Amino acid sequence: MDYRKKHYYKKVFFGIFGFLIIPAYSYLFALNGPGGDLIIVTFSQIGSRYGAIESLIFWGIMLSLYYFFFLSYLYQLTGEKNIFFQINLALSCLSILVTVFLPFAPTMFPIAGKLHNILARVSAVSCAVTLLVFVFTYLKIDRAVFIKSLIAFLVVLAFNVLILINYGISSLFQIVLAATFCPYLYLNLLFLEKSDKFNIYEVLEKAAAEREDGMDIF
């Protein structure tokens, strides 16, 4: 398949999941809480106390895989290679997965409950750091893209902090987090596509040529 078509299909796929499926699923999952209240419980509490653990695990898998594959693809488009970024990205996604698999039931599993809370915070910080490291890779290819991406990152971060301050760690906060950072990743794709100093299609063409050379062993 032509690399431009592959890019288009990936763009559509990431757009549908980031703007529609993940935010909608996050909201519908939150309705499993008491009376559909978005403030008094978190996703972890809904999963462990209200019989929605399978839905919580599915949400965690979907979110972590989206984050991993989309950010990996965006990083590939920059043409950069940074082992710190790649390791941090993998650890961020792994921590999300481990968090949703650990039961949040402090009375029944106190150690697992504490570890769950610790990993939840580690995941949030690690994801934010990974995104920030990614944003700074733009400095090497296009300063204008860097500025736009950094401003967008700070706006999204500030909005989430505002929700956190007013409503605490709640289902509402987790819905907003997913519904803002997924589109933020997509916004970065648009920034890269419209860059005046960088051509993502040249990177994709080079990668496709390297794959073909690797397959041609004779």
Image (cartoon, grey):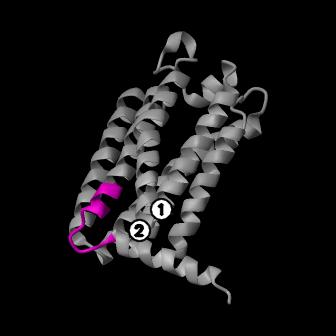
**Residue lying farthest to the bottom in this orientation:** 218
Q: Tell whether label 1 touches label 2 (CB within 8 Å).
A: yes
**In the rendered structure, which amino acid carries the disc numbered 1?**
Tyr
**In the rendered structure, which amino acid carries the disc numbered 2?**
Leu
Secondary structure found at label 1:
helix
Indicate whether 111 appears above or below 168.
below
**Residue lying farthest to the top in this orientation:** 35
The C terminus - image quarter: bottom right
Q: Nearer the viewer, residue 104 or 13?
A: 13
Dot 1 corresponds to which residue?
73
Q: Residue at x 78, y 33 (%)?
A: 109
Give the x, y percent position of residue 171.
49, 27
**Residue lying farthest to the right in this orientation:** 108
Indicate whether 72 appears above or below 142.
above
Residue 130 seen from this side: no
Q: Nearer the viewer, residue 3 or 171?
A: 3
Q: Nearer the viewer, residue 97 or 3?
A: 3
Q: Which mark is residue 77?
A: 2
Q: Residues within 10 Å of mark 1 (few under 14, many from 20)?
A: some
Give the x, y percent position of residue 2.
46, 65
Q: Residue at x 72, y 28 (%)?
A: 105
Q: Residue at x 45, y 52 (%)?
A: 9
Give the x, y percent position of residue 12.
41, 47
Q: Which mark is residue 127?
A: none
Whether residue 198 is in magenta: the answer is: yes
Write the start and end of the magenta stretch as one range.
188-199
Give the mark count. Answer: 2
Give the x, y percent position of residue 1.
51, 63
Whether residue 51 is in magenta: the answer is: no
Quarter-of-image position of residue 147: bottom left
Q: Residue at x 36, y 75 (%)?
A: 202
Secondary structure found at label 2:
helix
